[in-house]
Amino acid sequence: MSDVTGTRPLGSGESAFDRRRRRIGTLFAWMCGLATLVGVFALGILLVDVLMDGLGRLDVAFLTSFASRFPERAGVKAALAGSVWILGLTALISFPISVAAAIYLEEYAARNWVTKTIQTNIANLAGVPSIVYGILGLALFVRGLGLQRSIISGALTLSLLIMPLIIMASQEAIRAVPRTIREAAYGLGATRWQVTATQVLPMALPGILTGTILALSRAVGETAPLIMVGAVGFVAFTPKGLTDQFTVLPLQIYNWVSRPQDEFRDLAAAGIIVLLVLLLTMNAVAIILRNRAQVRR
Amino acid sequence: MATTYDIDLGGRDPALEAVDLSVYYGETHAVQNVSLTVPQNQVVALIGPSGCGKSTLLRCFNRMNDLISSARVDGRVDFHGQNLYAPEIDPVEVRRRIGMVFQKPNPFPKSIFDNVAFGPRVNGMKVDLDALVEESLRSAALWDEVSDRLNDSAYALSGGQQQRLCIARTLAVRPEIVLMDEPASALDPIATQRIEELIYELKKDYTIVIVTHNMQQAARISDYTAFLYMGQLIEYGPTETIFTNPREERTEAYVTGRFG
């Protein structure tokens, strides 16, 4: 008992138990660190490999040339334009619908079993494999609505795919607005619409935008559903309108990789670099938006 | 079961009259058949131990409980002879005319000016906003401290200043009654004293109902005190009577600090 009463100086005499728990603590920290490194390492190898193969082929001509059966003349112009078109349209379609749905679910819907069912379904939809959305898009947009194998079919399909993600991220952001702010606004005689528009949305917007951009990042990397709705691997023109045929970067990359000549693999690597730059730029925008919001609060 | 306390209003009109008011949260009967009258231009304190239903009762007076989906209110609250819970009454109008100050200062993440101007703006009040903001900040005894930095963020103010800003914000919509839910509980003693002095000043123009945990505070600032315990109104009367000569044994035990 005497060593618990505090007469013993600090650091004198460490028991076997003390040594053991200290060792376990150190081991645990190392294992967690190692697990972190696995991800970083894999990404690093991937980047180095891609950069080594692709950097040599990356130039202005690569960005401004159409696909070609001669590797030295081929470029990503059509695919880059297609990706940007798809991205823009998907954002235009999915953002307003998703945010409105999130606002409805958080601020308006009664807390009952109907809402709960909808909520559960949205969460489930976020986990549905993207090829399933592709089949749905083929049946609904390409055939059902007669939109054919066009950019708008692709954008609508990808919108379906990412809307659950944006809805859930937006709900999260809306839920994070303190209840006290809502109460203060209601207490001053604001209507539900005014509370939502003047207080809740401005505070939730950075979170909503971050979620949207991350969801769009996923959309820009999708291939499978777009193959289903008719994106093609070889397009020699940039889209002029919603009903034009199109291709996107991941599909162009896949097309090149599957060719027998080695030169096309270098082209694929260069295409991957373009895609990565697009993705990293989008993620950077998401981070900047989030940081700006934190400073303001 | 519930006793009705016919208090002497001292010739004043009633500002609010709760009649047989009950609040349920799901199965919990949080406020049980409470009847009480709030006289005009007086300060009424609601006291009682934690969980006794005093905040819930306060939130009935401007229909803030409507925002909690599990809450259900029975009974009446009369305001100018009109039941606040009548089906044709719009809770938005109720909250404009009966304002509320909350326990923790909750300014909007906007400038000081925009905080005060928010209420007049959302209510479409056709007024000179600059003058109204100044008047409201003066009434809340904050003008002298912030007049040169109205465009600064409200978050730059101290806790006590933020709470006075919240009071100014409430006054800016020109309510008739101001409800205060432990407005000084998150503040230091000096800031608390300023809020108490302010309440005394505000009594001239407003009727105030205040929830407080602090019995000295209730004794200092209120004209009437209601003691609630486990959802029931145990006793209601002039503050002096409640603190010096209560009718109920439980009231005496609570105000003398023997329980709660």
Image (tube, coloured by chain):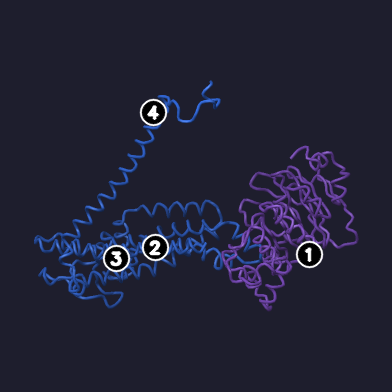
- Left or right for A261, reference B222: left
**Which one is nearer the viewer's eye here, A251 or A55?**
A55
For disc 4, the marked residue is A20
Q: Quadrant of residue A75?
A: bottom left
Q: Amino acid at mark 1?
A: Tyr
State whether discs 4 and 1 lie on one chain. Answer: no
Q: Position of residue A229 (x, y in %)?
A: 27, 64
For disc 1, the marked residue is B206
Task: Name which of mark 2 and mark 3 comes first in the sequence.
Answer: 3
Q: Which chain is disc 4 placed on?
A: A
Chain in purple in the render: B
Q: Amino acid at mark 3?
A: Leu
Q: Quadrant of the N terminus of chain B?
A: top right
Q: Secondary structure at mark 1?
A: loop
Q: Position of residue A113 (x, y in %)?
A: 52, 51
Q: CA distance from mark 2 to mark 1?
A: 48 Å
Q: Which chain is disc 3 placed on?
A: A
- Left or right for A47, reference B147: left
Q: Secondary structure at mark 2?
A: helix
Q: Amino acid at mark 4?
A: Arg
Crowd around label 3: few <14 · some 14–19 · many ≥20 (10 Å): some
For disc 2, the marked residue is A286
Q: Quadrant of residue A179?
A: bottom right
**Which one is nearer the viewer's eye here, B56 or A111?**
B56
